[in-house]
């Protein structure tokens, strides 16, 4: 039989703890049972009866509102990439009456792990961009709390990814059609799952097409690091530079232009994600358009399924779209000019 709380009065959260379910799921079992798996409802009612729980109608609205909360964990909330994703989450969560809390890890692994460990009991569910937390820790969390990962796949954990490996190939194919034969890849964070997937597919596709690929990095995905990445890439005299994301690519373009190189006449540049900066930079940035808002929608829908008793992990991959702009063109037929 479930243990009774020491305080005497049994609260909704006590029933949630005893059943191992989210407080919002327990609340819905009482207020809107049609939205909860019938076996889950039976379990909740049985445990609630054994514990002597009595729901107080005068507290229903406030109690339910306080428990309807989703935690969003991202590496940098000011990053345009995460803004699009969070916008999609907020749209869906707001319609369902959920509050959202954003935790910004600041690209710090220790903060990422701390947020994941400490917040899982304070909210109904977590949607996390957690590229560096060990997979074993995320699997353990997924066994005890509703969790959806963004842009990372781990067996046994629900996830939404805003690109596919074939999308990466499309970007290489675009450069190949322009006659590019030597590409420098400015890789992202070393332990990021998306960086590994992109790097592996780039290596594979370039080998298939006979393109020389030089991998540099890792780099922090910021404009400032894009300058550093381009300064290193120039030494290889590439015909094209590919950045892990738009920020790296934009920084690379800024560096090239500042040092007398022409884009794309001397060097073509590509990015990933199609954030706002991709269209603002004067050349325009050729990149993959990640369906970020849609990814946010899918993540929330997946989380709601977990809250309502769904079992079995899903991995959703959404297709990105190639967007061509002025940063790419025919490969140069001349030596790079001296800066």
Image: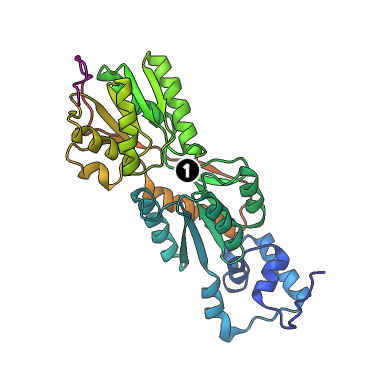
Relative side of 105 to 37, left or right = left
In the image, what residue occupies the spot 46% across and 68% down? 99
For the rendered model, the colour scheme is rainbow
Of 121 and 63, which appears nearest the observer?
121
86 vs 337: above or below: below
Residue 270 image point, x, y percent: 30, 32
Residue 273 in sight: no
178 vs 260: above or below: above
Magenta stretch, main secondary structure class: loop
307 vs 249: above or below: below
Quarter of the image where the C terminus is located: top left
In the image, what residue occupies the spot 30% across and 42% down? 274
Relative side of 29 to 149, left or right = right
Of 31 and 56, which appears nearest the observer?
56
In this view, the residue farthest toward the front is 339
Relative side of 125 to 4, left or right = left
Quarter of the image where the N terminus is located: bottom right
325 vs 130: above or below: above
Residue 265 part of the magenta segment? no
Of 47 and 213, which appears nearest the observer?
213
In this view, the residue farthest toward the right is 1
Of 132 and 260, which appears nearest the observer?
260
Residue 102 in sight: yes
What stretch of residues is rendered in magenta? 331-339
Residue 185 image point, x, y percent: 38, 28
Which residue has dot 1 on it?
Answer: 151
In the image, what residue occupies the spot 47% across and 37% down? 194
């Amino acid at each position: 039989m479930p243990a009774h709380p020491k305080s005497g009065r049994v609260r909704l959260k006590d029933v949630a703890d005893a059943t191992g379910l989210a407080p919002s799921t327990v609340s819905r079992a009482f207020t809107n049972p049609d939205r909860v798996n019938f076996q889950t409802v039976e379990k909740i009612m049985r445990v609630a009866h054994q514990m002597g729980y009595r729901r107080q109608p005068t507290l229903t609205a406030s109690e339910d509102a306080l428990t309807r909360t989703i935690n969003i964990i991202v590496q940098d909330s000011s990053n345009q990439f995460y803004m699009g994703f969070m916008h999609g989450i907020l749209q869906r969560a707001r319609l369902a009456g959920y509050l959202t809390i954003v935790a910004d890890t600041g690209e710090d692994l220790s903060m990422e792990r701390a947020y994941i460990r400490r917040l899982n009991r304070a909210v109904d569910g977590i949607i996390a961009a957690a590229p560096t937390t060990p997979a074993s820790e995320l699997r353990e969390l997924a066994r005890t709390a509703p969790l959806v990962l963004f842009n990372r796949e781990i067996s046994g954990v629900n996830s939404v990814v805003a690109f596919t490996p074939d999308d990466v190939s499309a970007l290489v194919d675009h450069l190949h059609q322009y006659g590019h034969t030597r590409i420098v890849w400015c890789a992202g964070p070393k332990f990021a799952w998306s960086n590994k997937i992109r790097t592996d597919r780039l290596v594979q596709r370039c080998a298939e097409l006979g393109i020389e690929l030089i991998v540099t990095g890792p780099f922090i995905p910021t404009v400032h690091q894009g300058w550093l990445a381009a300064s290193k890439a120039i030494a290889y005299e590439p015909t094209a530079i590919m950045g892990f994301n738009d920020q790296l690519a934009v920084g690379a373009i800024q560096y090239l232009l500042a040092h007398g190189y022409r884009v794309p006449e001397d060097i073509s540049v590509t990015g990933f994600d199609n954030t706002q900066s991709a269209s603002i930079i004067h050349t325009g940035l050729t990149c993959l358009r990640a369906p970020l808002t849609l990814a946010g929608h899918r993540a929330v829908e997946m989380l709601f399924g977990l809250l309502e008793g769904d079992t079995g992990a899903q991995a959703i991959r959404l297709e990105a779209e190639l967007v061509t702009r002025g940063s790419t063109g025919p490969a140069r037929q001349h030596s790079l000019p001296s800066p």
